[in-house]
Amino acid sequence: MRPVSRIDLDSADPLAVYAAIVEMDKDDFEDLMQEPPQRQRVIAALIEHMVGLFRPENAADVDAVIHIKLWDRPGGGYEHYELRIVNSTCALSHDPDSEADLTLKVRPTDLRKLITGETGARRLALIGRLRVIGDLGLGMKLPDLFGF
């Protein structure tokens, strides 16, 4: 597998980017998160993969907006994504425009661990690496909704 830094992030599809970052070691991934243009593309691939993990059979009674805020952006601030779960579907927005029922605050390295299955949401929350703000009942459903 090629390291993500050798992939043309402007033309690679999110699946190829995700496959490459799964193969990266922690230090290479953290270095990549310091390069703003690549960081955004890699984080978008992680979030899109998360949407692909969505389990509609577990979302029959869920109508919610989830915001994901990724800390530690070079220069300050954070990346912000929105997931809308309605009618057992999950849609991603790169431009959040609705009030969140639940907000997840996490660092990209921990998001990577969560989405790749290296760790679980509850564990990250217990050790303070994932902040869950808002509807905690919805937060408790995340493992069932996304399989992590």
Image (cartoon, rainbow, N blue to C red):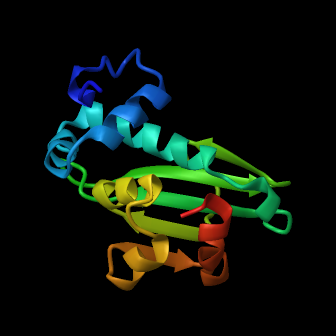
Q: Position of residue 116 (x, y in %)?
A: 43, 52
**Which residue corresponds to the image point at 36% horizontal and 58% vertical from the top-left?**
113
Instruction: Name the residue nearer the viewer: 83 or 115.
Output: 115
User: Is residue 15 left or right of 142 when viewed as pictured?
Assistant: left
Residue 62 sits above or below residue 136 on the image: above
**Which residue corresponds to the image point at 54% horizontal and 60% vertical from the top-left?**
67
Residue 46 sits above or below residue 6 on the image: below
Q: Position of residue 80 (x, y in %)?
A: 45, 51
* Numbered marks: total: 0
- Would residue 90 be seen by someone viewing this image from the given angle? yes
- Would residue 94 be seen by someone viewing this image from the given angle? no
Residue lying at the far front in this picture: please name it: 1
**Which residue corresponds to the image point at 53% horizontal and 41% vertical from the top-left?**
48
Residue 140 sits above or below residue 76 on the image: below
The quarter in which the N terminus is drawn is: top left
User: Is residue 126 left or right of 91 when viewed as pictured?
Assistant: left
Q: Position of residue 97 (x, y in %)?
A: 61, 50
Q: Position of residue 104 (x, y in %)?
A: 48, 67
User: Is residue 105 left or right of 75 when viewed as pictured?
Assistant: right
Quarter occupied by residue 120: bottom left
**Which residue corresponds to the image point at 81% horizontal and 58% vertical from the top-left?**
57
Residue 19 sits above or below residue 125 on the image: above
Quarter occupied by residue 108: bottom left
Instruction: Name the residue nearer the viewer: 20 or 139.
Output: 20
